[in-house]
Every structure is written in structure tokens, then in C-alpha cells.
Image: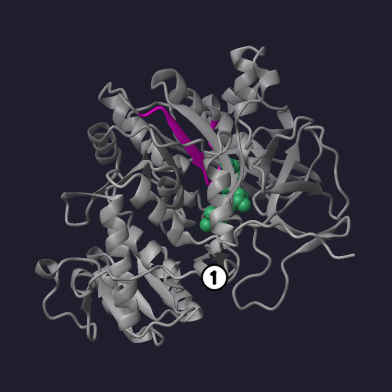
Amino acid sequence: MARLMGQMMQMPLMISSLLVHAARHHGDTEIVSKRVEGDIHRYTYQDAELRARKLAQAFARLGCEPGDRVATLAWNGYRHFEIYYGASGSELVCHTINPRLFPEQIAWIANDAADKVLCFDLNFLPLVEKLAPQLSSVKHFVAMVGRSHMPAGSSIPGLLCYEDLVDGEDGVYRWPEFDENTASSICYTSGTTGNPKGAVYSHRSTLLHTYGLALPDGMGVGAKDVILPVVPMFHVNAWGTPYAAPMIGAKLVFPGPHLDGKSLYELMEAEKVTFSAGVPTVWLGLINFAQAGKLKFSTLRRTVIGGSACPPAMMRTLEDEFDVEVIHAWGMTEMSPLGTLSKLKAKHASLDAEAQRRILEKQGKVIFGVDMEIIDDDGASLPWDGKASGNLVVRGPWVIQSYYQRPESPLVKVNGRDWFPTGDVAAIDADAYMQITDRSKDVIKSGGEWISSIDLENIAMGHPAVLEAAAIACRHPKWDERPLLVVVKKPGADLTREQMLGYFEGRIAKWQIPDDVAFVSEIPHTATGKIQKLKLRELFKDHRLPTN
Ligand code: ADP
């Protein structure tokens, strides 16, 4: 029997269509950028779309062909935004590189991806000059500035000026339509274990992820919002916000390299930002600045916090002191990145505020498009009872199937289907809310029992004298591993080891209380602003825990 096919228009899901939509339907909505040069730049979606078209023409004139990689070393700004669209929209692949990585890692990643063009913000000039001789595949280096800011006498051969490239084109260009499964962009994982690996997104996966992200129980953003992504555009495409904003017609505000509390606060106030997104460490700076000056946010109402566990104390401060709703989110590079977000269900409406908070402190429920399971070491599914914790696996159209140029499949079979193992350990409750216990490599294994480093950190962060805390495993002759708490005190605060440990009494099982506390002036962070557990474990590898 002949199958009856749907009779709807065949329109491939194209990234360029997001910007075309914004230009047509939200043409005068602004994109505001604090530039590397220090000033504020403002224009509209209509301007951005025209310039992205000119950029696509310029890439073609430079000899770029479908599939070629255009790399960026850049902060959040309108030129970076144009590259997202100019490159992906013209069948090139936008490869955002994290400039905070070690130079050797940047070179390794650029060579692995065989980048053909490298566009960079001017403050990375010394870095790019140093790296250029090692970047064998790069044919064109582009400084993301206007002619008047072009550096004189750079050692980079044939250094091009971004604004000259754009100005050299007429914009008479129609965005091509092609297979929606074509690669649109690449992000590399940070490579905390071994060399970084590339996640290759497609137009289709990006568009589906963007729809999911915009849902009310996703980030829930709309045309009334003013979005300031603090999360960098080189950290999993700023969690999708540069795609979501044009889809829904929201005003975008880019902070450039100015990510300290004062700069962010002033920009949020000046541009009437309503919505933001970033890792917990960024909010530490912003909250400190606002508290010190007794400031409030006059327009900011919601923020997504993810990338690492958001301490409940931070959620409370933002909500109680600043009236900012925190949406706790979990995801990873391999998931484009969004997996779960914390939002309540109708049945939770009757719960008291404390009970609601305990739900919202979890990493949350999946957005449609992602499914999840927890499995034991033999691959068997574990119950969703909020207690059993196991290896978290996911599947969906915006989850990777394989890594760039790696033949081996990362997937595992569960109940006859392929799933991606996240490397996280989690529990799922009966209402399908997921809570991360730990990354499997960070969990503290004490005498065969597991202690969640996240639980310990969340408790420590609730102490008023603690600025930041990290719990790591320390070798122990009897228990194998025991927790050591590394603490940065708030400036001027008084806190002893005994007071810190005493704070855990009654808040967690006795055997899980850390054995010792180490006070430090600073905790090392990864290139994406997360606590660098590997480095901490190295630093404290000879630490001797008290024996009684
Ligand atoms: P990397 O941290 O290696 O640069 P990712 O940004 O992809 O790479 O990190 C993904 C990981 O970050 C997740 O697997 C998880 O361990 C951690 N993570 C992300 N969001 C959260 C969260 N809300 N709570 C706890 N852990 C999180």
C-alpha cells in the first residue's frame, strides 16, 4: 500500500531564517554592544541582517567554500553575532574558540578543526600573533575592528580588517537553502580529560534547540524581553541566546569583555535588561557589587544559571534581596547545550514557598526534545524515586551522535536504543525532576559510599562568611577518600575551621561532613568559569587530613 505523505511545504530549517525573520518582523529592535574599544554600539536587526549578508559575500570572495570553517576568538558583540549568521547562513561552519584556553590548546583545536578563516577581537592580537605560525590551515586572519583601529606593523601575514570586508560588498545576496542537516557550527569540549573533542551542530539541531529553549518552561523569553547573555558566545553558543533572540524578536545586549560586576550592573540598568544567563561565578561578582552599593535591579527579573550547580544560597539571595527569579538549568556542549530547567508544575502551586524552592533548586525537568534515563554500571535503568542515583544518559535531536572526526561512537545502548552518556551522576524523582549528584569524576568515594561534592559546596555557600567553596576528594588510609573543603572567605569575614565544620552539623549526615577545611585566597576556575576540580585535587594531593 502506498504511504500517504504529508503535503506541507518542504522548508529546510535554516539558521539564516532566524535573522531574516527578525529583520522583517522586528526590524527596528535593537542590538546593543559594549565594544572592546570601550564605547557602546547600537543598531537594529535590519542592520545586522544586511551586514551578515555582506559578510557572507566577503567570505565567498576570500575563497571560502561550503563546509569551510570560520573560527572566532571573540567576546559577545554585534560583529561576533554577524559571523554566527554570515558564516552558518552561507554554508560555512562557525567555530567559536574559547580564548581563555591555553595557547597550545587553542592551536590544537584550530588545527584539529582545520579552520580556514580566523576572526578575532583586537585585544587578542598578541595571542593571535604568537599562534599564527602554528595555524597551518588558516588562510585569512581578520581583525574585528574598523580601519582606524587596525594595528600598524602586525606580524600576522595579510591581516584583514573586518569593516573593510563588510564595506567592500553590496549586500545583494540571497541566503541559500540547503540540507538542514548540514553542519552549522562547532564547539569543542574543554578537554578536562584528554584532548578537546568537537561537537558539530547542524542547522536542524540548532533550530529545534532554539524552539525548545524559547518555550515557557525553557528560558521562556519573548519580544518584550531584553536579553543580556553573560555566558560567552564561545561557551556553547552562549547557550543558544543569539539564536533565540532573533526568533522571538527580543532586544539583545552584548557586554563585550566587560564582565565585572560593576560593568554588568551598569549595562543592565542602562539598557533595561529583563533577562540574563550565566554560570554561578559571574553572579558572585554581580551580587557582591550590588550588595556593597545597596543597589537593586530596576528591570532584571529573570536569569538562567547553569554550567555548574547553582548554590541554593545564591538562588535565595537573588530572589529575596533582588527580586530576580533564578531558573536553574543543566546541559553540556554535547547537548547544544540545554537539557533540563527548573520550573514548577501546576500541582506544585499549593506547596509552601520552602517546598517549592526545594524543587526549583534541582536541575529540573527536560524540555521536549530531550529524554533522559539513569542507569547503573551494567546499563540497567534505575527507578525515578529521587533516591536512586546513577549514570545520566540522554537522547534527542540536539544531542550529539559522534564527535568531530572521531570514528568511535560515544553512545551506549539502554533498552535497545542509543543514548549519550553525560558523565554526570544524577537522581530523578517521581515528578521527573533531575538532580545532579556530581560529575562521576568529582564524586568523593568514602569507604564504598558516595559523597556529593555539590551537596557539600551548596551547604558551605550558605554560610554568610563564605564567598566560594569547593569540595574535593583527599586520599585517606582507611576510607580511601574523604572530603576536603576548600574555602575562600568573604573579604574581612572571620571564619575558623571549627566554625565551618560545625555549620555542617544537622545539615548533612555526620559521615559526610568534610574531614578538613583549607582556606585559600582564590579557587582556580576553568576557561568557562567553573571550579577546576582537577587542579584543586593536584594542589591538595599531599594534604594530610587530621587522623581522629
Ligand atoms: P566543560 O565544563 O567541560 O567545559 P560543558 O560546559 O559542556 O563542558 O559542561 C557540562 C557539564 O557541566 C555537565 O556535564 C555537568 O557536569 C556540569 N553542569 C552543567 N550544568 C550544571 C548544573 N546546573 N548543575 C550541576 N552541574 C552542571
Q: What span is in magenta?
A: 300-311
Position above or below: 252 against 234:
above
Verify whether residue 23 appears in magenta. Answer: no
> Is the C-beta of the residue carrying label 1 under 8 Å from the nearest atom of ligand 1?
no
Is residue 543 something that shows in the picture? no
Residue found 46% across the figure and 40% down from its top: 280
Residue found 39% across the figure and 72% down from its top: 71
Residue found 31% across the figure and 22% down from its top: 296
Q: Nearer the viewer, residue 547 or 57?
A: 57
Q: Nearer the viewer, residue 89 or 365?
A: 89
Q: In the drawing, does residue 117 fall left or right of residue 519?
A: left
Mark 1 belongs to which amino acid?
Ala
Q: In the drawing, does residue 289 fall left or right of residue 365?
A: left
Q: Quadrant of residue 87?
A: bottom left
Q: Quadrant of residue 99?
A: bottom left
Residue found 19% across the figure and 75% down from its top: 168
Q: Position of residue 114 (x, y in %)?
A: 46, 81
User: Total label count?
Assistant: 1
Position of the C terminus by quadrant: top right
Q: Position of residue 439 (x, y in %)?
A: 65, 50
Verify whether residue 310 appears in magenta. Answer: yes
Residue on which the image places disc 1 = 183
Q: Nearer the viewer, residue 160 or 472?
A: 160
Q: Nearer the viewer, residue 199 or 86?
A: 86
Position above or below: 374 against 293:
below
Is residue 157 something that shows in the picture? yes
Q: Position of residue 109 (x, y in %)?
A: 47, 74
Position above or below: 279 against 169:
above
